[in-house]
C-alpha cells in the first residue's frame, strides 16, 4: 500500500526568522481530506546520513482548495535545531518532500447534536502560536460552504509579528460586518502575551495568554463580552490547538459552566471541547 506522496514546494513566505508559511503540491494530485486533519512531512536530513525523517503538521488550507496544502511552521531551535524544521527553513520553490496522507480526527468539526439534529452552536477556536493552523482551514471552509454558525477565532502569540494570518482573518471579520451575521458570522481576536516588550508597543488589543479570554471576572469572562452572551455548552462548542497549558487553561475556566471534553463525555456520548496538543 502506498502511504506517502512525492510533493513539490511551490511557495514559501518567511514571516520572520523562525516562522514560515509553506505550500506543497503532491505530484500525483491532491487527495481528499477533511478540515482539521494533519499529515506528515518527510525530509532527508544530511546530518543523519540523508535519512528520511517525518513530522506531523496541521493542514492550514481547506478542502475546497484543490491547488495545494498550506502549513505554518515554527523553526524549533532549542536546545538543538530540530531535524525537520531546520530542513524546511532551507527549502526553496521546486524542492521535493514526502507527504503522508491526511489523517487525525481530534479537530474534526462537530456536525450533529446528541439527538441527531444539526449542530448550530457557536464555534470558538483557540489557537496558541502555530496552533492557529487548523482554524485557518475552519475559517475558509465554513466561509466557502456558507455555514451559518457563528465562528470565533482567538489567536495567542508572544509578538505582534507572529499574528500570521491577521490580514486574512481581519478581512473575514470585515466581510461579516458588511454582509451581516445572518450571512457570515465571524469574529477574530488576538492575544499578545508579552505586551511589555518594546516590539509590541503598538498593541492595543487583548493582553495575556490566549486562554485568559475564558478567565472568570466579576462580570463573567472576556469571551462572554466578546460574543454578547454567557457561553454555555448549550450555545457553544470549543476547539483548542496549542500547548497543553493553553488547553488546560481553557478547560479549567469553562468546566464550572458544564463544558466537558471527549475524555469525560456524558452518558449520551456528548461533549463540547475538542483539542489537539503540541506533542
Ligand atoms: C498533530 C500535530 C500537528 C502539528 N502541527 C504543527 C504545525 O502546524 N506547525 C508546527 O510548526 N509544528 C507542528 N507540529 C510539531 C511538529 O510535528 C514537530 O514536532 C516540530 O516541527 C519539531 O520537529 P523537528 O524535527 O524540527 O524537531 P526535532 O528534531 O524532533 O526536535 C524536537 C525537540 O527536541 C530537541 N532535540 C533534538 N535533538 C536533541 C538532542 N540530541 N538532545 C536534546 N534535545 C534534542 C530539539 O531542540 C527540539 O526542541 C505538530 C505536531 C503534531 C503532533
Ligand atoms: N498540533 C500540534 O500539535 C502543533 C501545532 C502547531 C505547532 N506545534 C509545535 O508547538 C511548538 C511551539 O509552537 P509555537 O512556536 O507556535 O508557540 P509560541 O509562538 O512559542 O507560543 C505561542 C503562545 O503560547 C504561549 N505559551 C508558551 N508556552 C506555553 C505554555 N506552556 N502554556 C500555555 N501557553 C504557552 C506563548 O506565551 P509566552 O509569550 O508567555 O511564551 C504564546 O502566547 C513548536 O514546537 C511547534 O512545532 C504543534
Image (tube, rainbow, N blue to C red):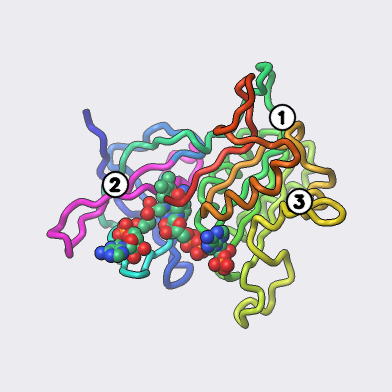
Which mark is in front, 2 or 1? 1
Front-most of 93 and 139? Answer: 139
Which is nearer the N-term, disc 2 or disc 1? 2
- Given contact means CB atoms under 8 Å apart, are the residues at marks 2 and 1 in contact? no
Mark 1, residue position: 120
Secondary structure of the residue carrying numbered label 2: strand
Mark 2, residue position: 7
| Residue drawn at point x = 60 percent, y = 70 percent | 160
User: Within the magenta stretch, is there residue 224?
Assistant: no
| Residue drawn at point x = 69 percent, y = 19 percent | 117
| Residue drawn at point x = 48 percent, y = 37 percent | 63
Percent x, y of residue 136: 56, 48
Q: Which quadrant does ligand 1 occupy? A: bottom left
**Does any atom of ligand 2 lie closer than 8 Å to the CB of label 3?**
no
User: Within the magenta stretch, is there residue 41?
Assistant: yes
Q: Is residue 44 left or right of residue 152?
A: left
For residue 207, which quarter of the picture? bottom right
How far separated are the C-alphas under marks 2 and 1? Answer: 37 Å
Instruction: Give the magenta part as a residue range.
Output: 38-67
Mark 3, residue position: 223
Amino acid at each position: 500500500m502506498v502511504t506517502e506522496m512525492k510533493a513539490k514546494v511551490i511557495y514559501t513566505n518567511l514571516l520572520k526568522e523562525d516562522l514560515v508559511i509553506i505550500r506543497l503540491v503532491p505530484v500525483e494530485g491532491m487527495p481528499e481530506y477533511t478540515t482539521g486533519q494533519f499529515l506528515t512531512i518527510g525530509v532527508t536530513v544530511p546530518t543523519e546520513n540523508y535519512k528520511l525523517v517525518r513530522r506531523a503538521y496541521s493542514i492550514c488550507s481547506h478542502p475546497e482548495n484543490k491547488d495545494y496544502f498550506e502549513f505554518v511552521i515554527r523553526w524549533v531551535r532549542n536546545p538543538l535545531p530540530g531535524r525537520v524544521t531546520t530542513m524546511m527553513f532551507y527549502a526553496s520553490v521546486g524542492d521535493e518532500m514526502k507527504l503522508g496522507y491526511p489523517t487525525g480526527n481530534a479537530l474534526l468539526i462537530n456536525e450533529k447534536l446528541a439527538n441527531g439534529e444539526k449542530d448550530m452552536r457557536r464555534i470558538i477556536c483557540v489557537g496558541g502560536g502555530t496552533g492557529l493552523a487548523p482554524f485557518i482551514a475552519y475559517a475558509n471552509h465554513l466561509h466557502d460552504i456558507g455555514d451559518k454558525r457563528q465562528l470565533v477565532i482567538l489567536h495567542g502569540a508572544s509578538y505582534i509579528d507572529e499574528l500570521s494570518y491577521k490580514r486574512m482573518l481581519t478581512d473575514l471579520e470585515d466581510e461579516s460586518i458588511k454582509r451581516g451575521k445572518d450571512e457570515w458570522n465571524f469574529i477574530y481576536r488576538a492575544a499578545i502575551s508579552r505586551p511589555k516588550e518594546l516590539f509590541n508597543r503598538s498593541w492595543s488589543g487583548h493582553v495575556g495568554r490566549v486562554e485568559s479570554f475564558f478567565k472568570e471576572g466579576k462580570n463573567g469572562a472576556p469571551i462572554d463580552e466578546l460574543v454578547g452572551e454567557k457561553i454555555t455548552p448549550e450555545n457553544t462548542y470549543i476547539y483548542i490547538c496549542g500547548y497543553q497549558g493553553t488547553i488546560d487553561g481553557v478547560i479549567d475556566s469553562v468546566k464550572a459552566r458544564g463544558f466537558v471534553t471527549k475524555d469525560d463525555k456524558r452518558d449520551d456520548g456528548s461533549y463540547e471541547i475538542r483539542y489537539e496538543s503540541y506533542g
